[in-house]
Amino acid sequence: MSYFYGPVPSRRLGFSLGVNLTPKKFCTLDCIYCQLGRTTKKTIKRFFYVEIIEFKKELAKIINNNPKIDYISISGSGEPTLHKRLDKIIDAIKDVANNKYPVSVITNSSLLYKKEVRQELAGADLIIPSLDAATKKSFSRIDKPHKQITFERTIDGLINLRKEFKGKIWLEIMLLGGINDSLEEARKFKKLVNRIKPDKVQLNLPIRPAGISITLPDYERVKKIKKIIGKKCEIVSSFYKDAQKKFSKSVQEDIRKYLNIRPATMRDLEKSVGLEKGILARQIKRMLDLGLIARKIYNRKVYFICDKAA
Ligand code: SF4
């Protein structure tokens, strides 16, 4: 397995070289919006997965071939803090890169309640922890955490991280339409932000629908939420349009995948793609206009089929 991917252009980090430490979808949570699919192993057990000599060799090679790297980002296809002794990983990166590149860690915040995890992260330059909910109820609904991960513990972990960590903290809030984007929830987020005291707050949006009905919040609503949270809060420029485009593209891919196998009615698609009727109808219309799918009447019912010639 390769420990690295990219460098990839990132909206927040410029050219970011990604570091993947854990096996795919080993995570402490099983978020409903996860782009990687369902968590295959929900755990809080930490292991040392990396072969450090191989890791360093691979990194040296990548750095030699890529003059443009703005950040080396520990993230990957699961929760990176499930890797033990992250301090060793950060040291290895700094050593190979000769301290030339800042190191960021992108985490779901769930293990920050453990002192050793916070201590291991001390050598990073930037931590991007996420917080998806401002209440216990939406935390369980959105993040589906491991039974030992609680909302209170997660908040305590974030508060303690801020007290101890000398680098920058950018708190990420994922906004999901109709789930955590009410103005009431925004006011609760504001209170939590005041306690956590990150350097900034970034409002993020789901760019890929997962197995359930997830929609983008209305942009006017996002702007209001930003205002409520205050001056530390930003919606990264072109975020919304970009997210909208990617969101539509991936919904269309899901519809096509389904129709490639069998014709379907709107109701079939509603169940399989897991989107709310209005959003689905808009995407279907767009796809019909573009000639990507076609409509057929059979037994007085409207079916959609994948027009492979299109
Ligand atoms: S924390 Fe990240 S990797 Fe884990 S389930 Fe949530 S979105 Fe997916």
Image: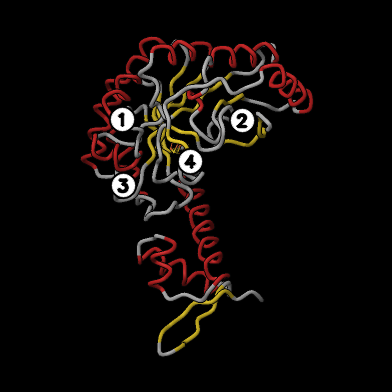
Q: Earlier in the sequence, mark 2 or mark 4?
A: 2
Q: CA distance from mark 2 to mark 3?
A: 32 Å
Q: Nearer the viewer, mark 2 or mark 3?
A: 2
Provide residue 219's location: percent of width, then percent of height: 37, 49
The circle on residue 40 is 4
Q: Secondary structure at mark 4?
A: loop
Q: Name the residue: 43% across, 68% down.
A: 269
Q: Secondary structure at mark 3?
A: helix
Q: Determine which quarter of the picture holds residue 308.
A: bottom right
Three-letter residue code for mark 2: Gly
Residue to which mark 1 is pinned: 230
Three-letter residue code for mark 4: Thr
Q: Secondary structure at mark 2?
A: strand
Three-letter residue code for mark 3: Arg
Q: Give the class, few, some or many, for how many residues have Cα within 10 Å of label 4's Cα (few <14, many ≥20).
A: few
Q: Earlier in the sequence, mark 1 or mark 2?
A: 2
Q: CA distance from mark 2 to mark 4?
A: 21 Å
Q: Secondary structure at mark 1?
A: loop
Q: Determine which quarter of the picture holds residue 275.
A: bottom left
Q: Nearer the viewer, residue 299 or 162?
A: 299
